[in-house]
Amino acid sequence: MSARGRLPAGAAASTGWRAFLYLLMIAIAVASAFPLVWMVLSSLKTPAEAMQTPPVWLPATPSLDAYQKVNELIRVGRSFANSALIAGITTAGILVTSLMAGYAFAKYRFRYREVLFAITIATMFLPPIVTLIPLYRLVGSIGLNASLAGVILPNLANAFGIFLMRQFIAGMPDELLEAARLDGASEFRIVFQIVAPAVAPALAALALFAFVYHWNSYLWPLTVLQGNSDNYPIVISLSRLLSYNRSAVNTGLVMAGATLAVLPPLILFVFLQRFFVRTITASGVTGQ
């Protein structure tokens, strides 16, 4: 190869390092996605294929029998509706309270503001098990035991969400908000028509975090609902399948139930991932 066709030593090293990083990222992505792919494929296998050794990677004749059996064992539709109600309302409440509280902490000047914000942040470090009994007693005192309202109400505000919104809103220019006030805009209009669109990526990321967390929540709903199976979310309803996990014959059944539970958060992530990445990038670049 002529000297003109050769890459400089520095450029060749840079290209080689970049290729190595790409291969490393691909390997990490494959390793991360493998359990999910294996779970879905296993849910489509016949009992004979699930028991086969060495394992069968791809089902020869994909079958939805396991999903039908899950629907017979538990009330999938009702459980999905309960989970959607719990996660959806809780997420909406967290977005509203976090946006408003974050705006107040970022743009208002009032006495003991920093102290109150520090106390709010301190609650993030409390293990959920510490607050379980006080919250349960509080829910019982207002007559919301064994109800979906009792599951939802204590989670409508979130310290992490307030912290995240405060950090992003603090970077907005005060002149923009003052101009809106001079034009006669109310504080609510400023928050929801000016601030909210400006921090939309952060709101989307917070929505993803909140929805996934409360969709997968197990201990708190189980404690509050007190055996009221009509209000069980899908995660608790699927616990009935644990007894089937003792035999390889029922592997497809267990995997089908797990696939059903993970689909809604996964679909939400696909739609919101670009906002999530933009939020992480903005946080890293601006140092917020």
Image (cartoon, helix red, strand yellow):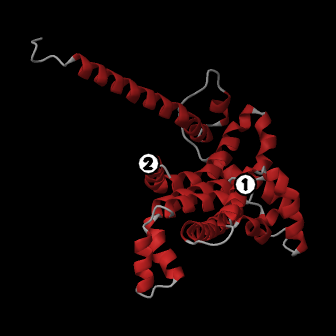
The local crowd at label 1, few if under 14, some if 14 to 19, many if 20 or more residues have their Cα within 10 Å, is few
- Front of the two marks 1 and 2: 1
The local crowd at label 2, few if under 14, some if 14 to 19, many if 20 or more residues have their Cα within 10 Å, is few
Q: Is residue 34 above or below residue 278?
A: above
Q: Is residue 222 above or below residue 5?
A: below
Residue at 79% x, 43% y is 242
Visible in this render: residue 226?
Answer: no
Report the Cα–Cα distance between label 1 and label 2: 26 Å
Q: Earlier in the sequence, mark 1 or mark 2?
A: 1
Q: Position of residue 235 (x, y in %)?
A: 72, 53
Q: Position of residue 151 (x, y in %)?
A: 77, 65
Q: Which residue is mark 2?
A: 281
In the image, taking residue 149 as reference, residue 63 lies left or right, namely left
Q: Which residue is mark 1?
A: 122
Q: Which element type, helix, strand or loop, lies under badge 2?
A: helix
Q: Position of residue 64 (x, y in %)?
A: 60, 47
